[in-house]
Image: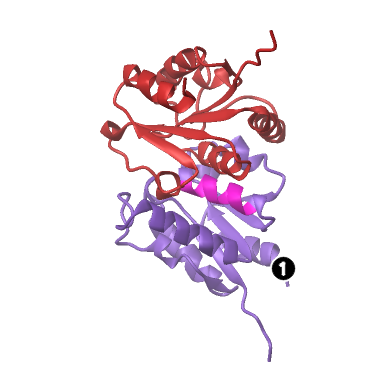
Chain colours: A purple, B red
Amino acid sequence: MGTTERVIYFAGSIRGGRDDSALYAQLIERLRGFGRVLTEHVGGASLTAEGETGSARDIHDRDLSWLKSADVVVAEVTTPSLGVGYEIARATEWGKPVLCLFRPGAGRSLSAMISGCPQVMVREYAAVTDADSILEEFFGP
Amino acid sequence: MGTTERVIYFAGSIRGGRDDSALYAQLIERLRGFGRVLTEHVGGASLTAEGETGSARDIHDRDLSWLKSADVVVAEVTTPSLGVGYEIARATEWGKPVLCLFRPGAGRSLSAMISGCPQVMVREYAAVTDADSILEEFFGP
């Protein structure tokens, strides 16, 4: 049939803090309706702020290889994270569409490097159910 | 005489949290011994986690223009920050030398995207006085 599945890189905070890990898992579940998600471990309940085991270089190179192979990036940016910011910048340099989801109700201000980046689509939301229409807008018909 | 002053981009958390702002100011003061620092406002005591006023697009474009014009980047990466991660990735894409300073005693784990990035020099330290020898190593004779 020749149908190629869309490949999605989901970015969320790991060592920056795991306050939103359950939400990441819910977003990843929804993203599965739009394509194949490479980074399902980001929503894993057993993954703590200490991060994955293994060498940092291996994790970095694996994630960058996944990012390079992805068609699009979806990032949850409410919890500040060096890694998520890093991945967004790499993706924009590589010309990939990036959607950033931010919850204003969490009491944080979003970095101007993200909200002011012209290559990034930033959308605010309150609950995971609000994300459906945003994802439909981002991925298109 | 033709001596060209080295231009330094200092990166530290703003909207990610201002816990280390006094330390940023001390690091910027030390960096002045090695060149001209473009981003002295990052250490400003009056700058809160709400960030600078003005449009996010203007802040983003100004900071990226400064980053592009800098010879080197020095980042304090103990407080997780989307903007700092974004700036590090852009700088590595552009081939600029990047030094990341991290304080293990603060009880956080550094992102594997930073500690595992082969284009970044990561150095751990405990107090700002320890930074002197690290800066001398990074900037060279």
**Front-most of A98 and B118?**
B118
Chain that bears disc 1: A
The spot of residue B132 in percent (x, y) is: 38, 18
**Front-most of A90 and A46?**
A90
* Magenta range: A83-91
Q: Is A85 within the magenta?
A: yes
Q: Label 1: which residue?
A: A140
Classify the position of the C terminus of chain A by image quarter. bottom right
Q: Residue at x 45, y 14 (%)?
A: B30
Tell me the kind of residue under disc 1.
Gly
Q: Quadrant of residue B39?
A: top right
The spot of residue A97 in percent (x, y) is: 67, 58
| Residue, far bottom | A1
Q: Is A76 within the magenta?
A: no
Q: Residue at x 46, y 61 (%)?
A: A62
The secondary structure type at the circle numbered 1 is: loop
Q: Residue at x 40, y 49 (%)?
A: B112
Residue A116 in sight from this viewpoint = yes
